[in-house]
Amino acid sequence: EDKVVQSPLSLVVHEGDTVTLNCSYEVTNFRSLLWYKQEKKAPTFLFMLTSSGIEKKSGRLSSILDKKELFSILNITATQTGDSAVYLCASQVFRFKNYGGSQGNLIFGKGTKLSVKP
Amino acid sequence: NAGVTQTPKFRVLKTGQSMTLLCAQDMNHEYMYWYRQDPGMGLRLIHYSVGEGTTAKGEVPDGYNVSRLKKQNFLLGLESAAPSQTSVYFCASSYTSGGNTGELFFGEGSRLTVL
């Protein structure tokens, strides 16, 4: 059975701290690993990773994938209260086919709830 | 642009009642999805559609039906609601252009309570 496991499930830090969120996956037909940020409502896309060892960066957030060890990390440096959210990791797999092509489906982890205190 | 819009945003039902959640997207996306999100369970795929007139089952399809009569709309129906269907429902859509990029665009969610 495909699964995606995130750790820790929750984390409380103070502004200015650096945090590392973990995501491990065991899936068949892996295609990519995605990170989303979910505040009060809809998840919003952060990163998509397909290749090992290549860091993706956006401001204070960065992420990297290790396809050999089957995990990814999301780093947030100099955290701010606005970083408080649930961070979702998802593995995209080839699961269903239609119209002559294979298309991916996303398997989500349970999320890490990050709370940043002033 | 509106993006992905879900209606209603909140609903309370009694056991056995039926209802339909509507999802509309204005991005001309081929793919649309319905997820449910429960505490401690993450997002789980209920049904999805890879184009107008097509639907397929996801991980947790039991008790739900869907229809995609128009490309921009994806409806999720509960024929006989049960308390186990109390959840937050998210609709999402994605591009297709020679391959799925993986990025989903989510609606803001619909909170459903079944008493």
Image (cartoon, coloured by chain):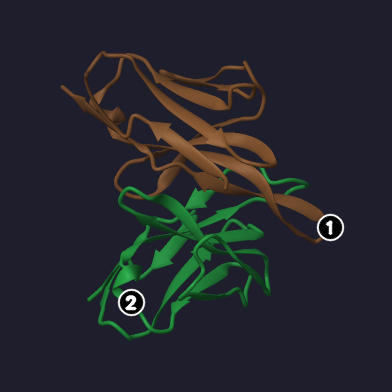
Asked if residue B77 shows in the view, the reply is yes
Name the residue carrying label 1. A100
- Label 1 environment density (alpha carbons within 10 Å; few <14, some 14–19, many ≥20): few
Q: Which chain is green?
A: B
Residue placed at 54% from the left, 46% from the top? A107
| Residue at the extreme front | A1
Question: Camera-side residue: A57 or A35?
Answer: A35
- Label 2 environment density (alpha carbons within 10 Å; few <14, some 14–19, many ≥20): some
| Residue at the extreme right | A100
Letter of the chain that mark 1 sits on in the rendering: A
Query: Disc 2, disc 1: CB below 8 Å?
Result: no
Q: Amino acid at mark 1?
A: Gly
Residue placed at 57% from the left, 37% from the top? A26
Asked if residue B111 shows in the view, the reply is no
Horizontal relation, residue A77 to residue A51: left or right: left
Residue A17: percent from left, percent from top: 27, 14
Name the residue carrying label 2. B82
Residue A63: percent from left, percent from top: 51, 22
Residue placed at 33% from the left, 50% from the top? A41
Horizontal relation, residue B27 to residue A29: left or right: left
Residue B42: percent from left, percent from top: 40, 48
Question: Camera-side residue: A69 or A77?
Answer: A69
Letter of the chain that mark 2 sits on in the rendering: B
Residue placed at 28% from the left, 82% from the top? B15
Secondary structure under tag 2 reads loop
Question: For residue A11, what is the image quadrant?
Answer: top left
Q: If the image is split into quadrants, where does the C terminus of chain A sit? A: top left
Q: Which chain is brown?
A: A
Secondary structure under tag 1 reads loop
| Residue at the extreme left | A118
Distance Cα–Cα, label 2 vs label 1: 38 Å
